[in-house]
Image (tube, grey):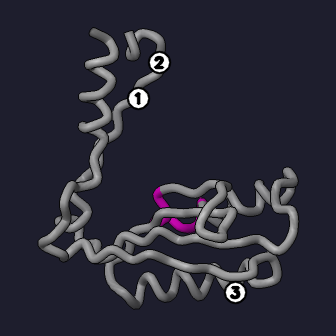
């Protein structure tokens, strides 16, 4: 049902650790001005398109922020370069950028990043 109605797309999520990524970062920013204009949205999309390490980005609300992105990095220096570039490029528009950094080299990861668990829920819904 979900496939026929195109509600489900399939995406392979590789093992990021095996691909050489050490950091998964959840980045939160708070904008000083209204960035919901078409011009700002296009500019933001252009910035993100230059950074293939950004896996997700959106407006939102929570933790004192109204923007969120999820990015992967080969090491801390790579992460730091991305955050520096983000701050330099958007500095006039953002109050702050905070990150929650996850080490992908950690042996205590409770569940790997995967959509297979969501698929299990959707299957139960179909039944």
Q: Residue 17: x percent and y percent?
A: 21, 67
Residue 51, picture quadrant: bottom right
Helix, strand or loop under label 1: loop
Q: Is residue 76 magenta?
A: no
Work out how far the residue at label 3 is from the one at label 1, CA to CA, in angstroms.
36 Å
Residue at image mark 3: 88
Using the image, determine if residue 10 lies above or below residue 55. above
Few, some or many residues within 10 Å of mark 3 (<14, 14–19, 20+):
few
Which contiguous range is marked in magenta? 49-55
State the image coordinates of residue 30 (x, y, percent, origin top left): 71, 72
Q: Residue 9, labelled with which disc?
A: 1
Mark 2 element type: loop
Circle 2/circle 1 CB separation < 8 Å: yes
Q: CA distance from mark 2 to mark 1?
A: 7 Å
Foreground: 116 or 11? 116
Estimate the x, y position of residue 9 in percent, counting from the top left: 41, 29
Q: Are marks 3 and 1 in contact (CB under 8 Å)?
A: no
Q: Residue 6 bears which disc, if any? A: 2
Q: Give 63 or 32, whichever is nearer the viewer.
A: 63
Q: Residue sitting at 66 percent across and 68 percent down? A: 65
């Amino acid at each position: 049902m979900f496939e026929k109605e195109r509600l489900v797309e399939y995406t392979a999520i590789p093992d990021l650790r095996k691909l050489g990524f050490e950091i998964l970062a959840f980045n939160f920013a708070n904008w000083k001005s209204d960035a919901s204009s078409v011009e700002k949205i296009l500019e933001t999309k252009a910035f993100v398109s230059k950074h293939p390490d950004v896996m997700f980005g959106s407006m939102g609300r929570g933790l004192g922020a109204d923007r969120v992105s999820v990015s992967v990095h080969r090491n801390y220096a790579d992460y730091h370069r991305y955050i520096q570039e983000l701050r330099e490029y958007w500095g006039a528009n953002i109050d702050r950028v905070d990150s929650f950094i996850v080490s992908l080299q950690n042996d205590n990861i409770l569940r790997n990043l995967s959509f297979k668990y969501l698929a299990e829920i959707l299957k139960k819904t179909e039944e």
